Image (cartoon, rainbow, N blue to C red):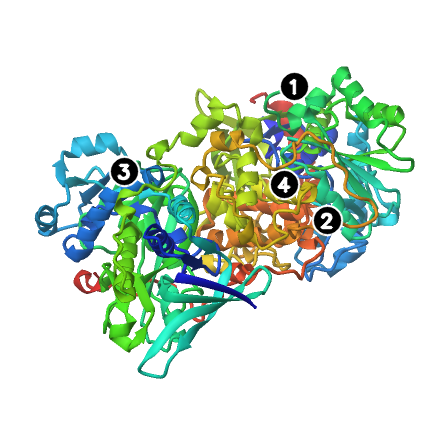
Amino acid sequence: MRQLQTEILVIGGGSTGTGVAWDAALRGFQTVLVEKRDLTHGTTGRYHGLVHSGGRYVVKDPRSAEECIQENRILRQTHTHCIEDTGGFFVVTPEDEGDYPDRFERACHDVGIPCSEISIAAALKQEPLLNPRTSRVFQLPDAAADSFLATHATAQAARQAGATLLIYHEVLDLLLQGAEGDRRVVGARVRDMTNGEEVMIHADMVINASGAWAGQIAKFAGVDVKIIPGKGVMIAMNHRIVNTVLNRCKMPADGDIIVPIHTVAVIGTTDEKVTDPERLRIEPWEVALMLEEGEKMVPGISRARVLRAWAGVRPLYQEGFSGESRDVTRALTLLDHRQRDAVSGFLTITGGKWTTFRLMAETTLDKACEQLGIRRPCTTATTPVPGIEQGHYWLGHRLHEVEEEHLQPELICECELVTRAMLEQAVQHNPTVTLDDLRRDVRLGMGPCQGGFCTYRAVCILHTLAQNAESPPPQASSPNERLDSAWEVAYLQSPAHNSKVPGKAPASTTSITSGETSTPIPSFDANLLLRDFLQERWKGLTPILWGQQLKQERLDELIYLSLLNVEHLPGEEATSPLTDFYRYNPQPEQFPVNPPEPTEESSHD
Amino acid sequence: MIDLLVIGAGLTGLTAAIRAAQAGLTVRVISQGVGSQLWGAGTIDLLGYLPDHTPVQMPLVAREQLPPEHPLRQVDAATIDKALASVQDWLAAEGFAYVGADQGANLWLPSAVGAKRPTYIAPSTQAAARLDDPAPLHIVGFDRLRDFYPTLLADNLRRQGHDARAHMLPLDLITQRHDANNVHLAQEFEEPARFDALVGSLRYVIKPGERIAFPAILGLAKHAQLVADLQSAIGAPIAEIPTLPPSVPGFRLHNALSHQLEKAGGRVETNMKPLEFGTEKSKSEKDNITWVATATSARPRRHYAHAYLLATGGFLGGGFNTDHTGRSWETVFNLSLTLPRHRDQWFRPEFLDPAGHALFQGGVQVNHAWQPVDAQGKLVYGNLWAAGNLLAHADAIRSRSHEALAIVTAAAAVEAILVQHQPAISAGSATSSRT
């Protein structure tokens, strides 16, 4: 069995875990991070992308609001290119009665969140689709973040500072020492999901940053951590219906945020307690509820084309809490298991928001330093991650680069403007187990056709790439060993930058001939990649298939069934570590035709 | 006033219009766009898989195992043969040979990803890649061509025991365009210089006995001649394999049938989105449709006809629409559809589930004379017929029946129109001049 020795072991490759690894590496700790799937596969990659100003929580949860505005200011400096400076509106619609707006304005002032009321005319000029019956509009510094890119950039910063990030490594158990009452966590036994190999990682301190899965990890240490998994359903509209983040100016509830992110607008979210963070189902009534709520801010939105729906799970935590998940604090929580459970060498960081991931990491490492008896200050707040020289994200950046560089013939995903070079660079420099990993890297298949055209193209390009590689093909060794820090992950979304990177791919003009007699063993199981990604896209489509998107789906059926006949390709029995996850979508035991009775606003909030 | 207004210019609408025009009716086809054949392989699939996933070798025999309400069960084998044979004749007259396997068997052809796909009648160039022929396939692709990749195709064919290899040529050989789709490439390929360049680069790499398979971009109108020339210049059989859409074989098919329709005296008018329609009471107590209005740049234009054939296709063709509440409607005449009422009953958890998704079994229900009926089985309009992929009880994409279902039901519906209404229509068309 392989053995690894490190000072800090981080469990979880979401924004929090990656942030913790970054902070630890910058403080000079030897750091290893393990993630059972791809970076951001969990909640980080399934959120709406809102960089909170704090306004949403300012009345209900001022501590969380304060954390948000502080981090909002910092992230604009450290992760500039991952953030679009959309600004945010808090709007009072005819549905929102009472003195909440006045309390809101006062609370913003108290917490120190810049908040200015603007005229309805000015608001409508900026957002023409905003409900014209809106009575008041407050402007706050909300923004939109690309959580995939931000985490990748943070990961690259961590690697540059010496951290090792092992993705597709699942924790099987924690290594414990000592008797009950004087226990110490000294590492973890993990399994490389790509080849089944087990690795022992010995560490001075283990940090559990596994989000909604934190309870499962803590159980390995015999510690009880009751995470309250709060399922949030989001739906992406096919168009960027608004350019400013829209919030209802009221107590947070379902479907009261619309976030413009890249080419779409996301309506979020619901909040429901669930038992299992993996087995999430999106009910038709949840989708209907979001559209109906969205109507209140943007009349007509429910008749616009919907692209996709998905659900993420908030890792909410509140000691001794037993109410609705909407009511659980959004503030971060650091559990010191030495003090709480007499288990040393083990910390759990949970709660919080994407917006506060850096602060969560700082808080965690401060505690780790204290327990390890080392004084090293946090520097993440003043250390930008690679790529910030690109400036804030803006909507036209890919199109601009494609046009400037004349890259149109290179596009293999026309919806999201992904070039062949972007795909090839991503696959050669990032571990790739499924095409969904590439979706998180370069946004492959995220547009209106939901992979209708690019799935086939990407699979064939990957297959050809692996076949043509003169050196060992990209996936021959453990994917993690092929990470190439010379390639700039922070630029993986830039068509122009990727076209200039001298790729290791063979020049595409060379003539290739694959052998006639011996069947070369594909390094990617292309047929499996194809089936997995079609199913992955299907999972997020079924909740919202009607109207135009249903017509588009029927075209995808024509392509993949009638034209390509993919369900009759050889190797039907092969599965990947994700196959089961993509398939899971059980029928409900009892289908509620109507949503549950709405609760009183005060209790629901 | 014309005899027959056909709504939809897919395979259903075009073939129905040709038949009706050849039978002497005055016909107009109106359509919003073009049919789904521009997305497909350009083959005529009849029945590839039964609902239990069994691959079909003899479609006309296996048809008996389809559910009794399936549209292909409402016609006899002779009618199917005849309908398909006449389409083959029309295409042959346009210079496109469509061929089938022997004795009514399915042809098994390679798909662009290397799966064996079943079809009944295929362009002879596609049939040249048939997988029951042991001659090795030498699959030629072009770098930078987005919609066709020979390597995976050849590897998958080899995994299934077929002799195949891949070969990549520079796309510059056939185009200087900066950004070209399949149809552009097919146009360019008709230029002699491109042809010579391609021949020059292939002559020395092929081996004796091989078949050379190209992506289906070998010309549009001049396709047959180009393939014959290429064959003699290279000295090997030439085959085509369909690419991702847009489909060049689909364009050829569409253009050929449109031309046949013109020769028969009919015409297609596109960019005509149906807006509304008028009705009147008829002698048979059922309402008759009196006109259908379509959008034009100036004002809605009314089309008056004695008979109307709805051939708008299903979800893909735009014949149906749905919303988030689970409501569904037929888009021209608001006919009732047999779709499940609740959205959670529409789909199965797995995209590739062989049983297919319940929603796509739904559609317009017709009586024995191919006239739409309501949920109670009652005739809706006295002079409205329906055919093609909008018909209920068939998921033709899942069963690989898409094109034959269109052609066969169109033929049957036109038969029914002629049987019931020919005398009246002919009399009417002689006295009316309104168009």
Tell me how far mark 4 sits from mark 2, CA to CA.
Answer: 17 Å
Q: Give a yes or no on whether discs 3 and 2 share a subunit.
A: no
Task: Check the image and name the residue furthest to the right.
Answer: B208
- Percent x, y of residue B124: 82, 35
Tell me how far mark 3 sits from mark 1, CA to CA.
Answer: 43 Å
Look at the numbered discs 3 and 2 and tell me whether their residues touch, using CB distance below 8 Å.
no
Look at the numbered discs 4 and 1 and tell me whether their residues touch, using CB distance below 8 Å.
no
Mark 4 residue type: Ile
Q: Give a yes or no on whether discs 3 and 1 share a subunit.
A: no
Residue density around tag 1, few if under 14, some if 14–19, many if 20 or more, within 10 Å: few
Q: Which residue is mark 4?
A: A461
* Mark toward the viewer: 3 or 4: 4
Q: Give a yes or no on whether discs 2 and 1 share a subunit.
A: yes
Q: Which residue is mark 2?
A: B115
Instruction: First in sequence, mark 2 or 1: give its number.
Output: 2
* Mark toward the viewer: 3 or 1: 1
Q: Which residue is mark 3?
A: A244
Mark 3 residue type: Thr
Instruction: First in sequence, mark 3 or 4: give its number.
Output: 3
Residue sitting at x 52%, y 65%: A3
Mark 1 residue type: Gln
Q: Chain of mark 2?
A: B
Mark 2 residue type: Ala
Residue sitting at x 14%, y 41%: A115
- Label 1: element kind: loop
Residue sitting at x 41%, y 76%: A176
Residue density around tag 3, few if under 14, some if 14–19, many if 20 or more, within 10 Å: many
Residue B176's disc number: 1
Tell me how far mark 3 sits from mark 2, CA to CA.
Answer: 47 Å
Q: Is residue A565 above or below residue B241?
A: below
- Percent x, y of residue B423: 69, 34
